[in-house]
Amino acid sequence: MLQQTPVSRVLPIWHEWVERWPEPADLAAAPPGEAIRHWGRLGYPRRALRLHQAAQAIVERHGGVVPSDHAELLALPGIGSYTAAAVASFAFGQRHAVLDTNVRRVFARAVTGIEYPPVATTAAETRLATELLPKEDARAARWAVAVMELGALVCTARSPKCAACPIADQCAWRLAGSPPHSGPARKGQAWAGTDRQIRGALLAALRVSREPLSHPQLVIEVPDSALREPGQRSRCLAGLIEDGLVEPLAGERYQLPA
């Protein structure tokens, strides 16, 4: 849930999820559409589907118990290198480099001396993060949390609180005079009228309804005035079906997957 989503948006949804589905088996037993429905407006709803698939795999392969082994975590549906490392480190106290946006920014500034890290994680960043980890598992797990919190609360993207930073005297970027970013422009993500917005609006209509919606009903929910181009609604609906987020029924009716 925290991937590409602020903690403030995740917390209420997370609390609802763990109350509704406290164990992987509880989530695995629910229809996938319910996972999508209760994902709400967190965005990137394929994450909800993958989480449901991961819960099913945990039940089938591990007796309903989340595995502690990094390789077994990585083998679960929808679990990439970042999530596997985060779970192994935060939940099981193991030594793994957990590289999210906040951590990468801390290392870029404190060690490399640049304001922002590259757009995509590089092999050099992963090597650096691994080299900086304390050798003991318990200390490495605490380190992973500490660096992430440092980036989220102090070494922020736009207004870093250097005066409050515990490593300010060692920060290569600060010691160099805090040079401005010289790489490619950091572009914000457009939203209005994009396929992401239209897909989200279609899913929102299906989440609210407990009955399948017809194509005319979806047109009412997502009118032509919301579209950037003709055919966008149909294209987005087809994409949702292909991704397994929407189930088509006879008579041009649609619902969340059962």
Image (spheres, rainbow, N blue to C red):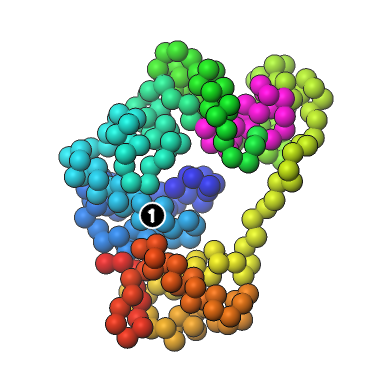
Residue 213 horizontal side relative to residue 103, left or right: left
Residue 149 in view (yes/no) = no
Residue furthest to the front: 123
What's the residue type where badge 1 is placed? Ala
| Quadrant assignment for the C terminus | bottom left
Task: State which quadrant residue 128 falls in.
Answer: top right
How far across and down, in percent of the image, does residue 56 sit? 24, 49
Residue 132 horizontal side relative to residue 118, left or right: left
The stretch drawn in magenta includes residue 106: yes
**Which SS class for mark 1?**
helix
- Prevailing secondary structure class for the magenta stretch in the rendered image: helix
How far across and down, in percent of the image, does residue 157 sit? 68, 39
Task: State which quadrant residue 141 falls in.
Answer: top left
Residue 136 horizontal side relative to residue 229, left or right: left
Q: Is residue 238 above or below residue 16?
A: below
Task: State which quadrant residue 59 falls in.
Answer: top left
The stretch drawn in magenta includes residue 62: no
Chain part drawn in magenta: 99-116
How far across and down, in percent of the image, does residue 133 sit? 50, 18
Residue 10 in view (yes/no) = yes
Nearer to me, 162 or 43: 43
Residue at figure coordinates x 55%, y 67% from the top left: 195
Question: What residue did someone put label 1 on?
Answer: 48
Nearer to me, 168 or 237: 237
How far across and down, in percent of the image, does residue 199 sit? 49, 68
Residue at figure coordinates x 57%, y 36% from the top left: 121
Residue 113 horizontal side relative to residue 204, left or right: right
Residue at figure coordinates x 43%, y 71% from the top left: 238
Residue at figure coordinates x 42%, y 83% from the top left: 215
